[in-house]
Amino acid sequence: MSLATTWSKAMGIDVPIVNAPMGGAAGARLAAAVSEAGGLGMVGMGSSATPEQLRRELADLAKPSRPFGIGLVHWVMTERPDLFDIALEARPALLSVSFGDDWAWVRRAHDVGVTVATQVATVGDALRAAEAGVDVLVARGAEAGGHGRPALGTLPLLTQVLDAVELPVLAAGGVASPRGLAAVLAAGAAAAWLGTVFTTCVEASTPAAARDRLLAANGENTMLTSEFDIRAGYRWPADVPERVLTDENGAATPVNAGQGVGMVNQSLTVAETMSRLCWGAEALLRRWS
Amino acid sequence: MSLATTWSKAMGIDVPIVNAPMGGAAGARLAAAVSEAGGLGMVGMGSSATPEQLRRELADLAKPSRPFGIGLVHWVMTERPDLFDIALEARPALLSVSFGDDWAWVRRAHDVGVTVATQVATVGDALRAAEAGVDVLVARGAEAGGHGRPALGTLPLLTQVLDAVELPVLAAGGVASPRGLAAVLAAGAAAAWLGTVFTTCVEASTPAAARDRLLAANGENTMLTSEFDIRAGYRWPADVPERVLTDENGAATPVNAGQGVGMVNQSLTVAETMSRLCWGAEALLRRWS
């Protein structure tokens, strides 16, 4: 048995795992490791992204032997249009742009043959993105770490979006173990879009102190906040807070984490992490054969 | 293929579906229909339960040909201890008591050979319930309708609890379609504990006006509130709000609903609902064989 889906086969990857393009954690090193391990590695550009930073990360990915992707934030890209141009020039297998409502970028990507994705938080979002020509939807549940609109839990969101659109749908939010991977694939997700589980990997750019807190945290130790965005002057939409770790007093810390963080207890390599996820999910799904 | 799990076989039921014991919706008629359709029908006693009401419902279930269960709320049972005595006398296949931290009832149920369940919202809850001798855990995610502690989404809660305990774990919250059922079974749930999807069934005691609102609602049209409990003088713990439908202005209404409500669009019989869920989930899981 293999976990391959119609979408993962079409993308030329071996396993239906994509790393969330997390600003500050998903640089070239993480993306390359995910792609080398058979998934789709995404380079993430977050709130403070610059064209120079994206160029540097892409240079490190020069001549990748496997498909890779790039993830941008719409409002950041609007302020620094070079980000989009540089991303397109790199001809990623997947370009994800989220948190905007102007879809002109979709046409520009399609004009040069680049497949595009965007995050959706509701069925309405999914229908609008499909109408705008987006190729792949990321159904991001409220459990997920980092920025997103917390409208619905991953399970009701994913399952309803899958019934509402014909597009491939990636599942994001709270998937951090083999059981979660098996669940979203059984539901019909084209792949899992994993964030928190990769933040503690050896290859992530996560600072050491944040990594230690992530490894020690329980699933309940997260909350939604816009506090750090406001303090930094970032232009995130008001309905897009970020999910972060809480400290021992229950106060927000500037470490992004999803509710799956309680299942992330070891700093492994990406290859070890993906192997563990895939073997476990295969064993779970095989029980139904 | 069949959806049977080790637990559903041990319980003597055909399909791993249990209806949530919803006060006001899950009376004898709903419970009997769920049991007759091969699941485990639960009679639910809510905030305003009385011994007379429970006796009446159980009389309607007299000599059931299939296993059935009863669900009580711990603080209500503490105020009306007869509820527990009457429930035990009925010798249900499963007795669920939730939202308390005194576990003396577990021993009393075990003394007469009754299997017991309780809802858990975190891994810590799960470990405490296991330590108290509870036989079956209901991992209830924040998406679920009605009362519960909204700590984690269903997917991270269920998957982590399954890894943390050896007990059978039922999955609750946001499961309202074949995809959701397939997902939680693939993750390893012993069964799905379904609420919202049964509230609109022909056999539910749900008032007609509430049923119409449930059928019309989208998944985002729910919120958490304690407003109605406070108004009614109910003694729900402060960290246990209820998830209800919102109206067109986004205000709370007194109709309980989970985030799966957007997937509930037709008033069907229980048999039709369960058949649709099971056939769909089997088809999804069969793809991995």
Image (cartoon, coloured by chain):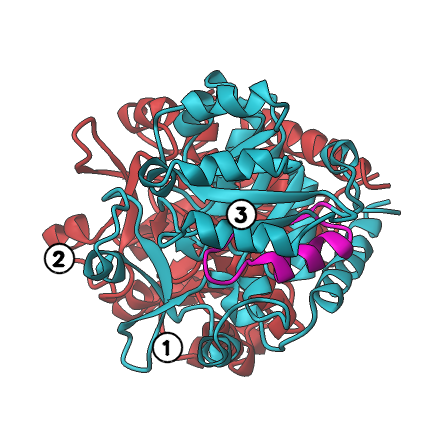
Chain colours: A cyan, B red
How far from the left and from the top, in percent, is residue B79? 25, 68
Disc 3 target residue? A172
Could you tell me which chain the residue with mark 1 belongs to? B
| Quadrant of res A163 | top right
User: Share a chain, discs 3 and 2?
Assistant: no
Residue on which the image places disc 2 = B233
The C terminus of chain A: image quadrant: top right
Amino acid type at image mark 3: Ala
Q: Which residues are magenta?
A: A16-39
* Count of numbered labels shown in the rendering: 3
Q: Secondary structure at mark 1?
A: loop
The reply, left or right, for residue A100 in relation to residue B275 is: left
* Residue situated in front as seen by the camera: A186 or B134: A186
* Alpha carbons under labels 3 and 1: distance apart: 34 Å
Q: Nearer the viewer, mark 3 or mark 1?
A: 3
Left or right, B96 with respect to A197, comes to: left
Do the numbered discs 3 and 2 sit on residues whose CB atoms are within 8 Å?
no
Q: Residue at x 52, y 39 (%)?
A: A86
State whether residue A73 appears in this view. yes
The residue that label 1 is drawn on is B101
Give the camera-side residue of B62 and B152. Answer: B152
Q: Do the residues indicated by labels 2 and 1 lie within the same chain of the protein?
A: yes
**Label 3 crowding class (10 Å Cα cut-off): few <14, some 14-19, many 20+?**
many
Residue plotted at (77% across, 55% down): A36
Nearest to N terminus: mark 2 or mark 1: 1
Q: Position of residue A12 (x, y in %)?
A: 78, 38
Residue A144: which disc? none
Residue B67 in view, yes or no: no
Distance CA(mark 2)–CA(mark 1): 21 Å
Residue A20, magenta (yes or no): yes
Q: Is residue A143 above or below residue B275?
A: below
Q: Percent x, y for residue A28?
A: 61, 57
